[in-house]
């Protein structure tokens, strides 16, 4: 309707809002992206890159797949309906194929990394996407094509982080909860509990401590400690230190790929689950990496990869 009345500015503003927030509302994004991609005139008027819209659809698949694996997420019914719609649009309706000519080798590797990590997709459609990429980019590493990120443990941490979280859990269980329980008992002695601010505050704090302890215990039970001997430095992987050349400013950047507990961008430590970390995984020296996330676009060449010995063993 806005297009019919030449209200392009309003239409662009609304679409920009949805597209910039695709991670927060994949359902709205999928609707907007499909509408734009199926209308070449609209795509040109709004001045969007077909490639970027397709990229974001793959990111939406990744987001939805993770939510589907979490039974506590309340959007399960919605996600089970939305996920196959995205796959069908990309594969059966050839939306993905129409963007291949705009892509570079680095783009293809990012899509491979994403699709390998999406557990909800069936192997037939995963293979179809891989085959299209391999046909378009024959130089793609076949090992990268067939190795999925499902091989990467979902919760990798260093021994230092594991020990730190263990101590944190013991502190909560053995010190903070008992101390707070005493505070609750003292507050109860003051009379009417309905108007007893100390009691209410202590009770709320107890709930917070118990929930924190529960979450820590749950995380500690599912983690895997990064073993230096298992780190593969032939390509970017968890436990590696990477030297990159930023092609936008010709400056060298260095990052260490570790887990989310170690993540510290000020120190150059990147979580392998972060968008930037995921974009680097699987690449080898001399490879070109394109990072496009949240409006930030960067282009790198990987110069050197080595084991992050100091951070893993200390």
Image (tube, rainbow, N blue to C red):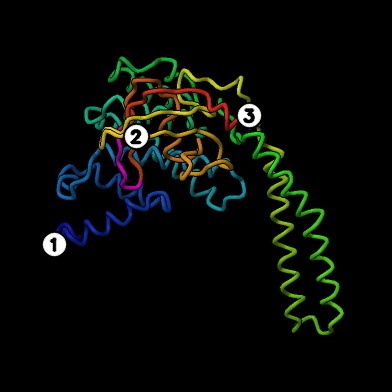
Q: How crowded is mark 1: few (under 14 residues within 10 Å), some or many (20 or more)?
A: few
Q: Circles 2 and 1: CB distance less than 8 Å?
A: no
Q: Answer above or below: position of 15 versus 197.
A: above
**Residue 39 image position (x, y, % from top left):** 20, 44
Q: Residues within 10 Å of mark 3 (few under 14, many from 20)?
A: few
Q: Residues within 10 Å of mark 2 (few under 14, many from 20)?
A: many
**Residue in view at x 30 percent, y 50 percent:** 32
Residue 93 shows in the view:
no
231 displayed left or right of 21: right
253 in magenta: no
Residue where numbered disc 2 is placed: 90
Report the span colored magenta. 294-299
Asked whether 121 or 309 is in front, the reply is 309
298 in magenta: yes
In the rendering, which numbered label is found on residue 17?
Answer: none
**Residue in view at x 60 percent, y 23 percent:** 228
Foreground disc of the pair 3, 2: 3
72 displayed left or right of 277: right
Circle 2: element type = helix
**Residue 180 image position (x, y, % from top left):** 79, 65
In the rendering, which numbered label is found on residue 5?
Answer: 1
Q: Counting residues from the N terminus, which is met first, the one under dot 3 or under dot 2?
A: 2
């Amino acid at each position: 309707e806005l297009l019919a009345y030449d209200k392009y500015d309003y239409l662009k503003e609304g679409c920009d809002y949805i597209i910039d927030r695709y991670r927060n509302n994949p359902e709205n994004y999928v609707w907007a992206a499909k509408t734009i991609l199926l209308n070449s005139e609209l795509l040109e008027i709004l001045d969007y890159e077909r490639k970027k819209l397709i990229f974001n659809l793959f990111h939406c698949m990744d987001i939805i797949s993770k939510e589907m694996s979490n039974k506590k997420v309340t959007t399960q019914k919605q996600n089970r309906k939305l996920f196959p719609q995205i796959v069908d649009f990309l594969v059966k309706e050839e939306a993905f194929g129409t963007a291949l000519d705009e892509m570079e080798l680095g783009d293809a590797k990012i899509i491979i990394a994403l699709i390998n990590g999406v557990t909800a997709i069936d192997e037939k459609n995963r293979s179809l996407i891989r085959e299209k990429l391999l046909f378009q980019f024959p130089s793609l590493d076949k090992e990268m094509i067939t190795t999925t990120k499902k091989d990467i443990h979902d919760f990798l941490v260093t021994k230092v982080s594991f020990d730190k979280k263990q101590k944190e859990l013991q502190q909560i269980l053995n010190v903070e909860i008992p101390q707070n329980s005493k505070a609750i008992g003292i507050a109860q002695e003051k009379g009417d509990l309905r108007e007893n601010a100390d009691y209410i505050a202590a009770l709320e704090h107890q709930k917070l401590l118990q929930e924190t302890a529960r979450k820590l215990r749950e995380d500690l039970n599912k983690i895997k400690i990064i073993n230096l001997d298992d780190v593969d430095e032939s390509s970017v992987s968890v436990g590696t230190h990477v030297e990159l050349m930023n092609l936008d400013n010709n400056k060298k950047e260095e990052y260490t790929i570790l887990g989310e507990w170690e993540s510290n961008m000020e120190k150059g430590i990147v979580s392998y689950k972060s968008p930037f970390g995921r974009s680097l995984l699987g690449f080898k020296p001399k490879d070109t990496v394109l990072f496009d996330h949240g409006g930030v676009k960067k282009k790198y060449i990987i110069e050197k990869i080595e084991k992050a010995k100091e951070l893993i063993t200390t």
